[in-house]
Image: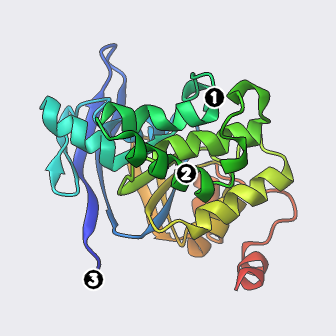
Amino acid sequence: MNDVVLSVKELAFAYPDGHQALYGVDVALTRGERVALLGPNGAGKTTLVMHLNGILQAGHGEVVVAGLKVDANKETLKEIRRRVGIVFQDPDDQLFMPTVFEDVAFGPKNLGLTDSEIESLVQKALTEVGMLEFKDRAPHHLSFGQRRRVALATVLVMQPEILILDEPSSNLDPASRRELSEILQKLDITLLMVTHDLPYALELCERSVILSGGIIAADGKTLNVLTDDALMKKHRLELPFGFDPRHAAQSMK
């Protein structure tokens, strides 16, 4: 069996105002897995993700990334944040430099690498997302879909072990949505994708986990989850009109 690269055990968390967001979450990802994190708004998905690289600290339970426990240790957190790359829903949260190249180079520069090492890493990351020809462009001159790909490159350049995507298909036109899917399918990386886009989950992730009311409500093959009508209805998950997961899964083979 593949190595476990992410382990969440009995994770519970309440915000300072007393709102309990997580009630004892247990989930694990093995190396190379692609897992969709599904659930209604307010289910605790964002809270869970913010525990995976130490933005939030567990109130109870533990999170372990590649053998490193996520806690308040600054050196451990630095390494965990290199190993766990998060691509946020709004690419403008991650793009702030004058050019695409400088944005993607920002992380490696903070590692103290040489100029030639940085150049090599940036070229590789931009090639992976199909944006190398735009390296000298200002990010704000790019389309939304292009900016999302550059944001992805700013994470891939750090060579993370786990890639977390927050609603990667949101606000993309059909062509940009397809292009991003093709890029993600080629990546050799462990993937956790938070999404309300259920067809995208089926296309990209063999396994899906439903987080609802702060607990894991289901964990199984994406096709099985999406075709369980009672489960879907209970957790306010709805497929697009006319979308048949069984038919779609057959056409993807």
- Return the x and y of residue 3 as percentages of the image width and height: 25, 72
Is the residue 149 above or below the residue 187 in the image? above
**Amino acid of disc 3:** Met
Residue in front for this viewpoint, 77 or 55:
77
Residue 80, by quadrant, is top left
Q: Which mark is residue 99?
A: 1
User: Real-space Cα distance between discs 2 and 1?
Assistant: 14 Å
Q: Which dot, 1 or 3, sits closer to the camera?
A: 1
User: Real-space Cα distance between discs 1 and 3?
Assistant: 43 Å
Q: Quadrant of the C terminus?
A: bottom right
Is the residue 72 above or below the residue 16 in the image? below
Q: Are marks 2 and 3 in contact (CB under 8 Å)?
A: no
Residue at x 12%, y 32% (from the top left corner) = 73
Left or right of 138, for residue 53 = left
**Amino acid of disc 1:** Thr
Residue tagged 3 = 1
The number of numbered badges drawn on the structure is 3
Q: Which mark is residue 125?
A: none
Q: Within 10 angstroms of label 1, few (less than 14), some, or many (20 or more) residues?
A: some
First along the sequence among labels 2 and 1: 1
- Return the x and y of residue 138 as percentages of the image width and height: 70, 27
User: Real-space Cα distance between discs 2 and 3?
Assistant: 34 Å
First along the sequence among labels 2 and 3: 3
Left or right of 50, for residue 57 = left
Residue tagged 2 = 123
